[in-house]
Image (cartoon, rainbow, N blue to C red):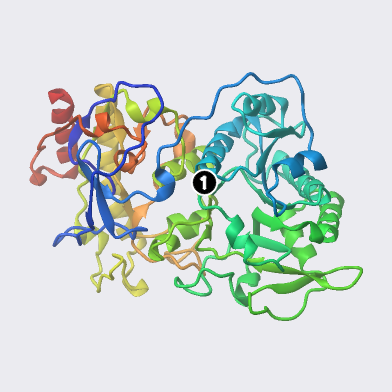
Amino acid sequence: GGGSAGSGAVGGGGGSGAVAAAAPLRELALPPAAEGVVPNASWWSDRMVELPGGMWCPKPPPFASAKPALPLVKAGEEKPRLTTELAKKHASADNMLIATYVNYNRLDFAFTLVRHLIALQQPHYLVGALDDEAGRGLQARGVPTFFMSSGLTTKDYGWGTKNFRELGLHKVNLVLELAKTGVDCLTIDADAFILRDPFPYFRKLPEAEVLTSSDHLVATNGYTDDGLESSSGFSSAFNIGYIFIRASALEFVQQWKEACFANKDAWDQVLFASVLRRGGGGGVDEHRLKPLFKKAGGGQVKAGVLPVSLFASGHTHFVSRMAHLMRSTPYMVHTTFQYGGAQGKRHRLREGMMWEDAPEYYSGPDFLTYELDLPRALVYPNGGTVGSDGTLPFDKRASVEQHFALVHHQLAQVRNGLALAKATGRILILPRLVCGLDRWWAPHRGIIPGSAARLPLLDCPADHVLDVERMGKVEPLLREHSFLCNPRTPASVRGSVAQLAGARPEAGPAASAAASAAASAAAS
């Protein structure tokens, strides 16, 4: 399950060129889990495919296709600034633009985002460079760039830090400058990846002047509706990591900026919501747009909350798995609600097959994988009727003690796998992990209060269990559980698997994993 190739050692691909597209060879319906086997988590497709190399996997999502590398070009000497001419040059024929901003430490986020946009044949974007090092790096890969010269750190900002607050001031200033150019702009954080072209969605809402993503954790219209959230969606925190603002809302943006600079210790996201709600009143219309900010000349800004299932947070996509339950793919996934800093974000995106690594990440050197011992009794310790998505009624959830028994059983195997991978000079491919309870920063009863998560979590994000941030650079140590089912992984890797039986289960799960992995590595 979850991309495991069974107990075995996996050889490297031996190549370092461009990643070749891995077209499926055959396609079949996904079979139900065998009797007594813990099922996989809900998935966007009910199909399985045979990938080159002979491995059968759940059908990868469209955005997981292999993509060409960005070009290497000579960076110029100029430092272009954001101007009306630049914005109009890159905007679409109907005046829409996508903009993000990045510092040197997050260049790889920008490069991945741009590769997704190119794959979507969406050329209408600009990337702001917060520092000159980032600007030169973007120019060297042919990314349309403007320099912001923020004076902030080139390293990670850290949520809630002084640098984080100051970044918010640069962001609101950027949104204002974009509005002043006259373009209707989608401004996003660099870790809010665009996986489907959003412009057709926005075109269906010509009266919407502000569309924002949200930290709301329930799809207010269920999983059969892809429209804006209903009126109750306005009650949760807006998330400005993904905001579409038409130039006609310039007055609102100006007042938002003034509020941010008058309250520099406040969070720009909170001030965004408070200013947007000034003078607001009335219910939502037939498109679920709500009249909010009152303009000086009369009239109000019409605003909408984008559906949390398809313009997703790190929780609604990776934990509640809303888009999967809809049998759909999201327009956007923002790596919020995760617990491993920038490295945790990268690992989440790799698990979801959204991240773009260099070819050598996928091709070698050599890997080690094992079949996870996952007793059904540990996953469903209190009985109950298991639903079609593998989850239970909330009153049958695991206790804290039962959750840790399940997690520790898996951690013992991961520990042995890491030790054996190190001893044999291989990189461990993690198994999919299963958690009895969700994770949050505050006390809870099993799930984040008000969320739509269903337990157990059958595809538990690794940062719920492993401290990938403290591990530092994880690439020399491990790969994500979906690695072998990722179309970016070459057939030469999937096709060079030595599968060997390990110790008998009676010897215990940790011993079984250890003996199995050791035998596999030695044999190959």
- Residue lying furthest right: 297
**Residue 267 in sight:** no
Q: Whole-percent x and y of residue 69?
A: 48, 30
For residue 458, what is the image quadrant? bottom left
Judging depth in this view, the residue of 36 and 505 nearest the camera is 36
Which residue sits at x=42%, y=31%? Answer: 474
**Residue 91 in sight:** yes
Q: Whole-percent x and y of residue 388?
A: 28, 69
For residue 493, what is the image quadrant? top left
Q: Which element is circle 1 on?
A: loop
Q: Whole-percent x and y of residue 61?
A: 39, 50
Which residue sits at x=50%, y=47%? Answer: 339
Judging depth in this view, the residue of 515 and 442 nearest the camera is 515
- Can you identify the residue that label 1 sits on? 120
Under mark 1, the amino acid is Leu
Which residue sits at x=41%, y=49%? Answer: 62
Please, is residue 483 above or below residue 434 in the view?
above
Instruction: Sort mark 1 into few (<14), some (14-19) or many (20+) by Cα contacts within 10 Å.
Output: some
Could you tell whether 167 is left or right of 64 in the image? right
Q: Quadrant of the C terminus?
A: top left
Could you tell whether 498 is left or right of 492 in the image? left
Question: In the rendered picture of this protein, how many numbered marks are placed on residues?
Answer: 1
Could you tell whether 301 is left or right of 119 in the image? right
Please, is residue 185 above or below residue 451 in the view?
above
Judging depth in this view, the residue of 383 and 95 nearest the camera is 95
Which residue sits at x=19%, y=55%? Answer: 375
Q: Whole-percent x and y of residue 53?
A: 22, 35
